[in-house]
Image (cartoon, grey):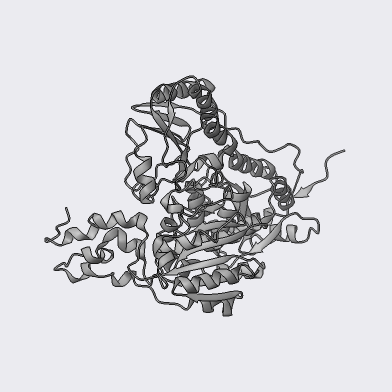
Amino acid sequence: MGQKKISVAKYLQIRLEQLGLTHLFGIAGNYTAPFLNTIHEDKNAKIKIVNDTNEINAGHCTDAYARQNGFAAVAVTYGVGAFTLLNSVAGSYVEHCPVLVINGGPTNKDQQRSLVQGMLASHMTGDMYSNINVFRNVTVAAEQITGSSDAPYKIDSVLNACILYGRPVYLEVFEDAWRMECNPPDAPLAEREVSKCQSSARKAAKRVAAMAQGKEIIFWGGIEIQRYGIQKEFLDLIETTDTEFVTSILGKSIVSENHPKFKGVFNGKASPKDVKEKFEKAQLKIGLGVWTTGKNLGGFDVWKDDTVLANHSGVRIGASYIANVSLRDFMIFLKEELTKVKFSAYEMYDAEQLPESFFVADQSIRKNAKPTLTYDTFFKRINTFIDERHIVVADAGFPLLGAQGIRIAEPNGFVAQASWLSIGYSVPAATGIKCARPDKRPVVFVGDGAFQETCQAISTQNKLKHDTVVFVLDNGIYGIEQMLVNPNPFRGAEKVEYSIPDLNDIYDYNQMHRWKYAKLVDVFGGRGFEVSTLDELNEVLKHLENIKENTIVHVNIPKTSIPESIAYKTEEPGEDEFLDKDWSLC
């Protein structure tokens, strides 16, 4: 007797539930309605549909959920929905987040009418492959389902690719195909394997151990440790060798930063000053899963002979490179090999000394009755507020650079899109984090420019009765954009007076329209506060302990305040400063 048939929509629902999906994000559309209705009508469904305010928010939300849950899915409608989602999916692709894009397409009849008659249904371009071809650029697998005969195979193939590669995949289903019948799943999906050539891993470990002979070494942990789920192996290496470590900014909180061997975030020139100076003095720096993107190196040269990089399935050792290496295997073998040689663990700080970036507050906060609220004083004060109950989400730009010094107690307790750097990521990301980790309270640090991109996410959070706290750091400008092209306005007493007037001030196009951010809760719901001093911030932080609803805190920051970690940029010429012949900072 044959198996009882089920719909293509039900088949996908079953597979998603097998992968542990609890929330499906997106924007409803008629082309995906048969799938959404299948879940909605199932009283025993394990998946909750979360209808967001727009596709880019849904995409960022999905990305963050994947970082905490290990897999996520977003459903949108053809063309207008899918193309809006593209930016978010590109971020997931670059930063290796396992996300399934579900795109409902026009019916087979609609596609035929387009080909034969030139009749376009809603959101069609006239090319039936327009959507899938776009997403092929930012996914590791993409399939189009037009009927039921091959639907199970195509669904399983994209999901297996998502599991195996840990990156986004794309599934496009024509509207009438959702209701067609197929056999139910009869085989398990793939399990992720990270092992590669063990002999290559051991060879690399032996070479690195030989380099360590007689040297002071330190480890530099990166995001692949979290993405591959190998935190235990990393800690075994740290604790067996009794060696200190820093992380990259993208890898911040791969393990608890309360670990006694953790010594800060190394982000090249954009590191906290004390961390940068001390880390660079180590005789051998061993990078484990660190991605060498320009923004997380800040000008640091990783190609020196004193730096080893194990990432992207290979290990670079001096001028040599060993390919096809599992990071997990490499760390296990490196632990063994280092026990056979004599090396010393580099000490960044004396036993009783903490990094300056982790002081509770600096002396100006303790002694001054009314200290200035700047990026650095704000984040030093926030350091006493954040604990294991929270997951921090930092947006691109000054908030990310300022937040890198916060001590994060919770493993995976710091989320930032530190490579793709789409501004506005943080606020909708907090929605996904709370859905994946309902026991935690997301705390967002976002600039005013980034907040204006995606502030509607606050509405979704209130609808879901979340308790997220969003600190909008309002300096009235696109600060990081101004810094990159012309840092002159941030130089203070060292500011240069140029003959070209525009080089002396913030560019008009970087000036923000000033909003009353705390008042947005009158529209979206929740609580709102505005602060301009540290005393006012202290009072709000006290209130937050008892507030259980979504909260916006509008933090006024001086226009030319910058985090200390980006101050090195003011010592260099911006791209536009070469326009003035009197430029004299060389």
Give above or below for 293 relative to 389. above
The picture places residue 333, in percent across and down from the top left corner, at 53, 24
Q: Residue furthest left?
A: 581
- At x 50% / y 40%, what residue is drawn? 261
Which image quadrant is residue 573 in? bottom left
- At x 51% / y 29%, what residue is drawn? 241
Which image quadrant is residue 276 in? top left
Total marks drawn?
0
The picture places residue 506, in percent across and down from the top left corner, at 28, 69
Q: Nearer the viewer, residue 299 or 54?
A: 299
Q: Nearer the viewer, residue 469 or 122?
A: 469
The picture places residue 497, in percent across and down from the top left corner, at 17, 67
Q: Nearer the viewer, residue 51 or 526?
A: 526
Q: Is residue 106 visible?
A: no
The picture places residue 389, in percent across and down from the top left corner, at 62, 57
Q: Is residue 573 visible?
A: yes
- At x 63% / y 61%, what residue is drawn? 31
Left or right, residue 19 beside residue 457 = right
**Quadrant holding the N terminus:** top right
Left or right, residue 159 beside residue 365 = right
Left or right, residue 249 beside residue 49 = left
Give above or below for 161 relative to 553. above
Give above or below for 374 relative to 528. above
Give above or below for 127 relative to 289. below
- At x 60% / y 50%, what residue is drawn? 68
Q: Nearer the viewer, residue 105 or 85?
A: 85
